[in-house]
Amino acid sequence: MIGWQVHAEPNRVQFPDLDALVHYTTVRRGDVTEHIMTTPTAMEAVRSGKPIPAGTHFVLVDHRDGELYRYFVMQKGEDWGADYDESRRTADWQFQWFWPDKSINMDENTARCQSCHRGQEGSDYLYTAYRIPRFDGTPVE
Ligand code: HEC
């Protein structure tokens, strides 16, 4: 296959400082519990209808049966969209899957992440940001 990589690529996404992020919502599905978090600055931008700034991380911490299973990370950077062609691009967001030891899952093609999140183009490629304005200190469920 030409064009799409079959295996994951280390890209520009860096594992974030989780302590600097705010857990604003929880999604539960069967034995899966997802803690979703981002920076206070990004939350302020969403609340005031401003663009989410470059440098922002969104993290989905995925637990299975109460155990940490993996981290899904989105990070936005200035002109990072230029790394991909138009058919794949998610504005300036890049995606990565990290294992609990923070190593990258090399079997994942992050084009898959982008392809699904492209459906959320109207909300800056995010699924749960609309919950941020309801956050009052307790993760929204
Ligand atoms: C089949 C569609 C789909 C794919 C593929 C997918 N996501 Fe998501 N993602 C979602 C949905 C839906 C949510 C909202 C939470 C939920 O319902 O589980 C979400 C939420 C997130 C969030 C929290 C921010 C937000 O948008 O609310 C991050 C971070 C994230 N995904 C990263 C990734 C990464 C990294 C990959 C690839 C390894 C990926 N996603 C693949 C559908 C997808």
Image (spheres, helix red, strand yellow):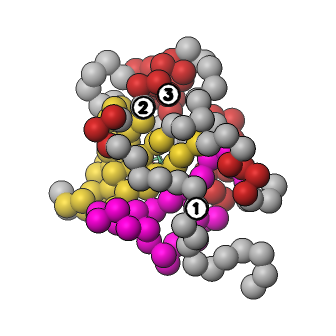
- Does the magenta portion include 97? yes
Residue depth check, mark 1 versus mark 3: number of the one nearer the observer: 1
Label 1 crowd (10 A; few <14 / some 14-19 / many >=20): few
Q: Is the residue marked by circle 2 packed among few (<14), some (14-19), or many (20+) residues within 10 Å?
A: many
**Ligand 1 lies under 8 Å from the Cβ of mark 2:** no
Residue type at tag 3: Ala
The amino acid at mark 2 is Thr
Distance CA(mark 3)–CA(mark 2): 5 Å
- From what the image shows, is residue 77 above or below residue 115? above
C-alpha span from label 1 to label 3: 22 Å
Determine whether, in the image, residue 58 is placed left or right of residue 117: left
Rendered image: mark on residue 42: 3
Please provide percent x and percent y for residue 118.
Answer: 67, 50
Q: Residue at x 63, y 57 (%)?
A: 114
| Residue corresponding to mark 1 | 11
- Which disc number belongs to residue 39? 2
Q: Amino acid at mark 1?
A: Asn
Instruction: Tell which of 36 and 84 is nearer to you.
Output: 84
Relative placement, left or right, of 65 versus 125 is left
Specify start and end residues of the magenta stretch as a single range: 89-113
Q: Secondary structure at mark 1?
A: loop
Alpha-carbon span between mark 1 and mark 2: 21 Å
At a point 54% along the width and 38% down the height, the residue shown is: 55
Query: Given contact means CB atoms under 8 Å apart, are the residues at marks 3 and 2 in contact?
Result: yes
Residue 120 visible in the snapshot? no
